[in-house]
Image: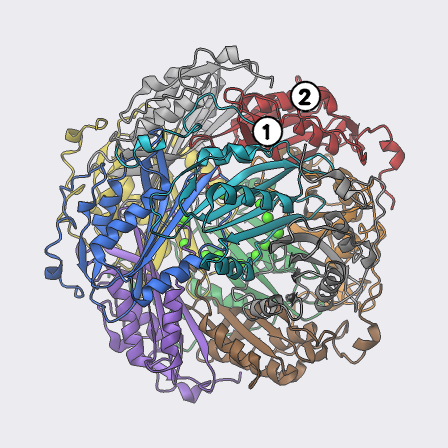
Chain colours: A purple, B blue, D red, E cyan, F yellow, G orange, I green, J brown
Amino acid sequence: MAGRQDQSLGHLSLLGNQHTKYTFEYDPSILEAVDNLHVNRDFFVKFNCPEFTSLCPMTGQPDFATMYISFIPDKKLVESKSLKLYLFSFRNHGDFHEDCVNIIMNDLIELLDPRYIEVWGKFTPRGGLSIDPYTNYGKPGTKYEEMASHRMMNHDMYPEKVDNR
Amino acid sequence: MAGRQDQSLGHLSLLGNQHTKYTFEYDPSILEAVDNLHVNRDFFVKFNCPEFTSLCPMTGQPDFATMYISFIPDKKLVESKSLKLYLFSFRNHGDFHEDCVNIIMNDLIELLDPRYIEVWGKFTPRGGLSIDPYTNYGKPGTKYEEMASHRMMNHDMYPEKVDNR
Amino acid sequence: MAGRQDQSLGHLSLLGNQHTKYTFEYDPSILEAVDNLHVNRDFFVKFNCPEFTSLCPMTGQPDFATMYISFIPDKKLVESKSLKLYLFSFRNHGDFHEDCVNIIMNDLIELLDPRYIEVWGKFTPRGGLSIDPYTNYGKPGTKYEEMASHRMMNHDMYPEKVDNR
Amino acid sequence: MAGRQDQSLGHLSLLGNQHTKYTFEYDPSILEAVDNLHVNRDFFVKFNCPEFTSLCPMTGQPDFATMYISFIPDKKLVESKSLKLYLFSFRNHGDFHEDCVNIIMNDLIELLDPRYIEVWGKFTPRGGLSIDPYTNYGKPGTKYEEMASHRMMNHDMYPEKVDNR
Amino acid sequence: MAGRQDQSLGHLSLLGNQHTKYTFEYDPSILEAVDNLHVNRDFFVKFNCPEFTSLCPMTGQPDFATMYISFIPDKKLVESKSLKLYLFSFRNHGDFHEDCVNIIMNDLIELLDPRYIEVWGKFTPRGGLSIDPYTNYGKPGTKYEEMASHRMMNHDMYPEKVDNR
Amino acid sequence: MAGRQDQSLGHLSLLGNQHTKYTFEYDPSILEAVDNLHVNRDFFVKFNCPEFTSLCPMTGQPDFATMYISFIPDKKLVESKSLKLYLFSFRNHGDFHEDCVNIIMNDLIELLDPRYIEVWGKFTPRGGLSIDPYTNYGKPGTKYEEMASHRMMNHDMYPEKVDNR
Amino acid sequence: MAGRQDQSLGHLSLLGNQHTKYTFEYDPSILEAVDNLHVNRDFFVKFNCPEFTSLCPMTGQPDFATMYISFIPDKKLVESKSLKLYLFSFRNHGDFHEDCVNIIMNDLIELLDPRYIEVWGKFTPRGGLSIDPYTNYGKPGTKYEEMASHRMMNHDMYPEKVDNR
Amino acid sequence: MAGRQDQSLGHLSLLGNQHTKYTFEYDPSILEAVDNLHVNRDFFVKFNCPEFTSLCPMTGQPDFATMYISFIPDKKLVESKSLKLYLFSFRNHGDFHEDCVNIIMNDLIELLDPRYIEVWGKFTPRGGLSIDPYTNYGKPGTKYEEMASHRMMNHDMYPEKVDNR
Amino acid sequence: MAGRQDQSLGHLSLLGNQHTKYTFEYDPSILEAVDNLHVNRDFFVKFNCPEFTSLCPMTGQPDFATMYISFIPDKKLVESKSLKLYLFSFRNHGDFHEDCVNIIMNDLIELLDPRYIEVWGKFTPRGGLSIDPYTNYGKPGTKYEEMASHRMMNHDMYPEKVDNR
Amino acid sequence: MAGRQDQSLGHLSLLGNQHTKYTFEYDPSILEAVDNLHVNRDFFVKFNCPEFTSLCPMTGQPDFATMYISFIPDKKLVESKSLKLYLFSFRNHGDFHEDCVNIIMNDLIELLDPRYIEVWGKFTPRGGLSIDPYTNYGKPGTKYEEMASHRMMNHDMYPEKVDNR
Ligand SMILES: [Ca+2]
Ligand SMILES: [Ca+2]
Ligand SMILES: [Ca+2]
Ligand SMILES: [Ca+2]
Ligand SMILES: [Ca+2]
Ligand SMILES: [Ca+2]
Ligand SMILES: [Ca+2]
Ligand SMILES: [Ca+2]
Ligand SMILES: [Ca+2]
Ligand SMILES: [Ca+2]
Ligand SMILES: [Ca+2]
Ligand SMILES: [Ca+2]
Ligand SMILES: [Ca+2]
Ligand SMILES: [Ca+2]
Ligand SMILES: [Ca+2]
Ligand SMILES: [Ca+2]
């Protein structure tokens, strides 16, 4: 088995670690990065995260969402197990839907300094309504800033059919 | 449980209020707003509302629709429980499909002064035909006005398959 | 245009009547029957009713369901416009989901004295849960009574996928 | 090209006939039969007919349905082009949904004297309700009569999802 | 019940009229218009029409299609019941698929003088092929003319999967 | 608003209670019952519960499932808000998938003494595999015990397509 | 790579043979069998065959179908490449839909002497109708003969939705 | 039956011709054109062709595809029955997938001199891979040439999910 | 976190073990069992396994399948991580589809001595055909043996639609 | 059988070769090219590859993905059987998801020197998350370089619904 060298991964504290401790209080320090081996190229990485859960800040009851996180890396990729654990850390955390997607994006910008990133949360309904916040970001002063505007302008012109079943 | 502070929500009259009174006559004063904590950024909030019902102004019989409401907030977000109650207030109100979406959008513009907003109603058929009105708005004199034109020009080029079953 | 003779339909008060009055308080007297022209044969009639709405008896807020009503007629069929108006009459009526399906079935038994009947309501979720009550009936002392037991015993062994979206 | 011999088909008046005359008034004499070459065996033939249209006997407006016709032949199969033309003959004919499926089945019993037959019509909604009548028949005094009872008793225990769109 | 005032609808000859006469020969005079109450705004109205049927001009046999009609109104909306009756009037009319969509669009342009309009017909297959003509129009000399070009240039880049079943 | 009388619901501690306290440690005492008003009849009540989450007893990481709970009541129905809170109480509880469904069923038997009950959990995959345990129960010495055997014998003969996406 | 021994497959003339000659005239001699290594057990083998095509015996034009072939083997399995080539041999062969499924089943009974077998063809529509013949067989004088009756009696009680698109 | 006049169709050799001869060797001379009655307007015509089959040039075995053919006509439309017969003529013809779509487009350009045309073939898998070639063309020196570039640049950014089942 | 006690799991060699060694040659000794805590009850456990891959014994090329494994345990459950690793061990193993499902079932019978078990493999197509073998087993001399016959007799009467895309 | 001449394919070492040797260690030398016969035209070729599997570089366990590979050829097409074998060669190779798509694209650029190419991998989940990397390339200094930027900027604005089932 050849490919990405194991040594390039030695600094990671989580991958393959049996005695992982799960944190259910919001903790952005969980996030870890790995090197992007293809910095000469723009490419997208998307994480599909259908197992996101947090608490409603007003009532304390659980909220559930699928988070779609997409970015064009610069020098860093997010290590996927650390992303999983980071998302787990919202489990007993209370915030509005609109806040969660912005916080997740802010933390990933802080970690990765990506060229472009976007986060879309699709929540299950409460009281017959469901809420799907979407936020994005392009590195200021680059073409990716324009890209963020362009994608915001064209966002979700075909809302998926939702019938609460 | 940390996150959005409870005190920032104290002015809300509806959230978590047990003795909610449901109004089934059109009443835009039901709508309430909360502060947008991320004004530095453009982001979208979409409400999926599959439980909209009103009355036909000609025959008095019930109409049913799914409403998709999306906006880019400026200083205000709409509080979701108040939006639910506002939509309930169409229950015994009579208006044409085309009028309902424009009225809902007008009321949310009045409440939120959003950067951008759009409302798409998808109604169930009467006499073998169904009607899906779509309206939008961008704050005049800003780039969001252009955004509204752009989205209108590119609206719904892939109509969903409808076979009345 | 031949077929079912118009005169056989003359007693109906609703069909094709322009000045229909819509009643939004529960009223089983709205229901009307027509003659079954094929009494020599068992056959099923199913009504798909995706536009059912009532009120929650505890909170007063609207509930939404699709009602599936199926029966084997004896001497009478339910006239479809009267069924529509009858279902409208739950619009401002408050009852539990489990009660609604039993009430609807009771009223149709009263009207039609059918050989067999069943009612299945599939409601939209409240608080992350949705409820789907199902009830049935076969004329006592006939093979249809057994049929009801048989169908109850085999009911819904493949629950549809529900993800609240 | 071998297989079913052309000569065995010579009596058919419709198949491949260019100057077909389309009749839009109900006419069961259009139906034609061909020999069943596999009488030693029970087998099913199903016709999927999504292009059925008739007129409402009360209002005169068009109704639309998909008809599913399935039978176990005895000595005869229905010739498919004649079935198509027969179904066309309902185009300007007025009858209730429940009557249409029984008439179609009666005419095919008359033509084919089949071992078993069933007809299921799934109509598009009027006023928010749709109606799906189902009827069946097994040759009296044979095991197919029991088969008809068995299939009636187990009919449609998983109603398809219908949301009128 | 408030909302659109009944008096503003008094001139309509069809809506709610019990004794509707159905015309099954092409007749564009059936179409009626109502005032657009939101002329200050661009908005789309889409009609989903899955019950369109006409006759093949060569063979006389019935054709079936779903028509999707979308427009941005100027001063007029099409009254929906009159549109239904107008589409019924193709029932015994013979024309090619490509002609039907252009005729429907021409008649609605004549009636409504809309800012923008498009018509897409999706027909059921004959001989293993199905045909989906699409046409559009923007008011000459306005930005809507460009809009029509833009939408034509970007039309249907993701053809829906069709397998004739 | 008529229907189920409010007074019959007065003993319930949870329904409509604003200051609900959410418990995230397994606690079957949360469950509450209401009277079945239709004891003369067998009918099914199904709860669709797509927001179930617990912890893996070996690794401590979150598991996610949709729970389908169906029963034929005897004298009692489960109050739906208490069921929701009970399911919440698994949030920080660790148990195997096979244990969870059996525990839930045992607790509901204890609460309701139902004629028949079944619980089916459909979990998201771990390591490329997902697990769907199903358990059921019929009151011993009644026909419902046979019903449980019958439904176990015929359980899930058409496994849903699962491709982990 | 262990498992089924290559030598047990040496008599096969087709598997892995580069210079396969494709025959497009019906030829049942193409079929080859391999030993069933699990004769002590009843098990099903299903072949999904969506690429079946033959010619209409009346008009000579191509027909298309998906064939579903399922059987419980006795001493022999059909070798899958030979089945593919056998089905290819209908390519320029003309026969009615009802005949094709019976011929295929007869040829496989001749080859395999199976305990049980069934063949279901689902054809694409001609003139708006599609035909789906189904036939089956159980070894006479065994429990599989009853099995064939049982499956015929319960065949296709949930016809798939067909809309010719 | 009015509409497109029969006389305008008199030169066609195929439409409604009973004694059609089917050619299964590639023959572009089969194609016939009819006049475009709407030359003043750009409109699209799409043919959905799910019954395309040819032979692999290397192995001789059948290939299957759905062909999607879309064009903006200039003075001519392709007559649909001739297109069907032309596509049949690939039945015993051998060519690579990439070649087939280009040949079909070339032949239609030759016949119709269209303003714009595109052909997309979606083939069934061989060896676990499937191939979907797409080609297009705009009349050189017109805006349709740009249109072709634009559509190529934006082609298929959302590949449909393919799992070979 | 309470629930299943950790100590009851101490003998397991794989669960949570970081230094798992993956074996890609068939090795049934990988399988491990855990105690069934609910032996007083019949319940089903289903494993959905969409990531099964083996090698074709004739050509050596990879095959892919989804395996559905369902059983009613007696004293033992299969530990899920060991099942995953066992299925991995087919990765470089060559066997016919029909053999794979029987081998997997035999190994699980050996490990678990279950009351009932069944295995259904759904493979991707080769040469346009796909094969779906299904096998089952009930403990001899118990009612589960009859259950196996019953489920075999009623197996897969609604084959899923397969079109190789 | 005419069409692409056999002699033009004589140099290929793999197509139709019975004694294919399968390599399960990464080996880009397996790839072979054939001439593009339509160099005068831009056209797309897409390969749908749902049977991709590699090993995780950290844990050694298998990963599974569907690879979508699309390109506009210049002088060369990739021969499809060689592409299949090349993708097989990742079977026992370890690399991160993000690396796999970039390596595949690099190797195809090396082989084909295409005008444009893109590779999208959609992987099955690990730990509840799935990862979908996408990369693209346009020949530097040509309009295809811009095309790559354009497609990156507009990539995947409608993420498919992923729920891990
Ligand atoms: Ca839904
Ligand atoms: Ca729905
Ligand atoms: Ca439908
Ligand atoms: Ca759903
Ligand atoms: Ca629907
Ligand atoms: Ca539909
Ligand atoms: Ca298909
Ligand atoms: Ca289809
Ligand atoms: Ca799936
Ligand atoms: Ca369809
Ligand atoms: Ca279809
Ligand atoms: Ca799949
Ligand atoms: Ca598929
Ligand atoms: Ca498919
Ligand atoms: Ca889901
Ligand atoms: Ca899924």
The residue singled out by tag 1 in the image is E24
Q: Amino acid at mark 2?
A: Asp
Q: Is mark 2 within 8 Å of ligand 11?
A: no
Q: Nearer the viewer, mark 1 or mark 2?
A: 1
Q: Quadrant of residue B78?
A: bottom left
Circles 1 and 2 on the same chain:
no
Count up the numbered dots: 2
Give the percent coordinates (x, y) of residue J77.
Answer: 68, 76
Q: Amino acid at mark 1?
A: Phe
**Residue depicted at 52% across the width and 52% down the height:** E137
Give the percent coordinates (x, y) of residue J72.
Answer: 62, 74
**Residue depicted at 22% across the width and 57% down the height:** B112
Q: Which mark is residue D107?
A: 2
Q: Is residue G162 visible?
A: no
Q: How far is disc 1 from disc 2 in space, using C-alphas?
A: 27 Å
Q: Is residue J107 above or below residue A89?
A: below
Label 1 crowding class (10 Å Cα cut-off): few <14, some 14-19, many 20+? many
**Residue depicted at 44% across the width and 28% down the height:** E14
Residue at disc 1, secondary structure: loop
Is F79 on the left or on the right of E73, as rendered? Answer: left
Q: Quadrant of residue A64?
A: bottom left
**Residue depicted at 79% across the width and 29% down the height:** D34
Report the chain holding disc 2: D
Q: Nearer the viewer, residue B104 or F80?
A: B104
Q: Is residue B97 visible?
A: yes
**Name of the residue lying farthest toward the bottom:** A7
Report the chain holding disc 1: E
Give the percent coordinates (x, y) of residue A87.
Answer: 30, 68
Label 2 crowding class (10 Å Cα cut-off): few <14, some 14-19, many 20+? some
